[in-house]
Image (cartoon, rainbow, N blue to C red):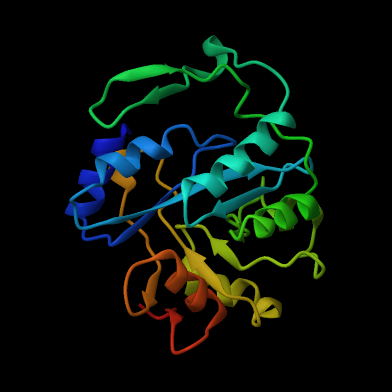
Amino acid sequence: MHPSAVVDEAVSQGVDVIAICDHNSSENVPYVLKAARGKPIVVIPGMEVTTREEVHVIALFEDTASLSALQEYVYANLSGLNDEKAFGLQPIVNEIGEVEGFNERLLIGATGISLEDLVSRIHEQSGLAIAAHIDRPSFSVISQLGFLPEHVPFDALEISSRLGIRGGREKFPELAHNTFITSSDAHFIKDIGTRFTAIFMEEARFSEIRLALKGRDGRFVVEDA
């Protein structure tokens, strides 16, 4: 899953846009952006943050500066060191496959940031906040809280690859007013492109995705694709 391998596989699968969302870390994102230069794909800088309630939230940004600001906030609220024997190495790999270093933080752990504060911080940095895999029995907002809090303004809700958007609509009819997306949530090269969200927009860029998630100006998520 090093940067150039991720980009090349996504391109080969015909994916136009990918978001790189490592858990509680963004240090590999700049290298994926470099690996994608000159190739027919757009990389969205992102992160999958674990709140203190152990809810996974996807944060997407237009640029790495905004992502870096969130990274500082996450690191300031993330305690513990990685146990390499238990959880494996956490390498930072550049665009040509060289290991630049290792992240020693406990990235698998939960931050001390509340769900409400995290979504607020993402929006302060002009990002998009998406509730990750809401249908999963663990680490989702519904599994952890038992409901979707109306006062937390998510920009979209992600349905896991095993269920997909149509299955999500059937399982959660009470969330009909929310925008649903789905993704491969790929942790292995072979999974890239196995599930995706089709979006109607003028061009592949962050601002167009924002409009589509809000259903504005003729942009929208194509749920039946």
Residue 156 shown left or right of residue 120 in the figure: left
Q: Quadrant of the C terminus?
A: bottom left
Query: Residue at 63% of width from left, 43% of height from top?
Result: 70
Residue 73 shows in this picture = yes
Q: Nearer the viewer, residue 122 or 137?
A: 122
Residue 47 shows in this picture = no
Snapshot quadrant of residue 223? bottom left
Query: Residue at 55% of width from left, 71% of height from top?
Result: 180
Query: Residue 154 at x, y = what percent?
Result: 67, 65
User: Extreme top residue here?
Assistant: 85
Query: Residue at 37% of width from left, 18% of height from top?
Result: 100
Q: Nearer the viewer, residue 36 or 85?
A: 36
User: Extreme front residue here?
Assistant: 65
Residue 180 shown left or right of residue 188 in the figure: right
Residue 192 shown left or right of residue 105 in the figure: left
Residue 140 shown left or right of residue 186 in the figure: right
Query: Residue at 52% of width from left, 20% of height from top?
Result: 103
Query: Residue 149 at x, y = what percent?
Result: 80, 65
Snapshot quadrant of residue 49? top right
Q: Quadrant of the N terminus?
A: top left
Query: Residue 182 at x, y = what percent?
Result: 47, 63
